[in-house]
Structures are given as C-alpha cells and as structure tokens.
Image: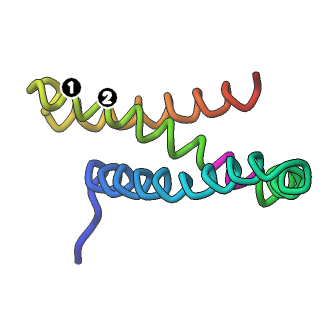
Amino acid sequence: MYKPQWTSVLSILHRASGVIIALSALLLAGWLGALAGGAPGYQIAHGFFTSWFGQLLLFLWTLCTFYHLCNGIRHLIWDAGVGLELSTAYLSGKIVLGATLGLTILAWWV
C-alpha cells in the first residue's frame, strides 16, 4: 500500500495552492468590477466579503498565498542544489508550514 511522503504531500499542496490563488483572481476581478459599478455594487461586495463565508475565503486565500510563497522560496533553494538531503527536506517542509502559519496569523492580527 502506498504511503504518501511528507515531501510529496507538500508538493501537491504547493500545486493546489497555486490553483486556488489563480481562481481567487476571479474574486479580485469581481470585487474590482463591483467597485467600478458604484455604491450598489460596492455594498454587495462589501456584504459578501464581511460575511463569515467571505472571511473564510479571504483567510484561505491568505493561507494559500503565504504557503505558495514560502514553499516557492524552498524550491528556489533546491534549484540551487542546497537542502536536497532527505532530513533537510523534511526540516525545510516544517519550516515552510511554520512560516505559513506565522505569516497568516500576523497578517490577520495586524
């Protein structure tokens, strides 16, 4: 039976976060369109983004953005040939997750 490896799970999450970021561009475009439409459109967008569901989407977008950024830096370091040993790869994955959570909490707290 196949057991997913830590590095493969993080790689899949990197791809998934990239897709989520790309799809969230549609929300951004909708928000900009609502702003351009005047007060009624803005009120609708504001109502959506301040609802619990809108806040959840924004939180997940923030989480995905920071994860994709941190893991992208990790991949750049790997491209330089550094940190490819299995123990280092596992450690850097844990650092990526910690940095992701820390940056997301910091962004929402400030």
Mark linked to residue 37: none
Please tell me whether residue 29 belongs to the stretch shown in magenta: no
Res 87 quadrant in image: top left
Question: Residue farthest to the left?
Answer: 81
Please tell me whether residue 58 belongs to the stretch shown in magenta: yes
- Image quarter in which the C terminus is found: top right
Give above or below for 2 relative to 74: below
**Which element is circle 1 on?**
helix
In the image, 55 versus 100, the foreground residue is 55
User: CA gap, disc 1 to disc 2?
Assistant: 6 Å
Cβ–Cβ under 8 Å for marks 1 and 2 = yes
Mark 2 — residue?
73
Amino acid residing under circle 2: Ile
**Which element is circle 2 on?**
helix
Q: Is residue 22 left or right of residue 8?
A: right
In the image, 98 versus 86, the foreground residue is 98
Mark linked to residue 77: 1
Q: Is residue 82 left or right of residue 51?
A: left
Q: Residue at (23%, 77%) from the top-left corner?
A: 1
Q: Residue at (56%, 54%) from the top-left corner?
A: 24
**Numbered label tally:** 2
Res 92 quadrant in image: top left
Res 88 quadrant in image: top left
Q: Residue at (29%, 63%) from the top-left corner?
A: 4
Residue 17 in picture, x, y percent from top left: 44, 52
Magenta residue span: 55-60
Q: Residue at (41%, 58%) from the top-left corner?
A: 16
Our reading of the magenta stretch's main secondary structure is helix
Amino acid residing under circle 1: Ile
Residue 5 in picture, x, y percent from top left: 27, 56
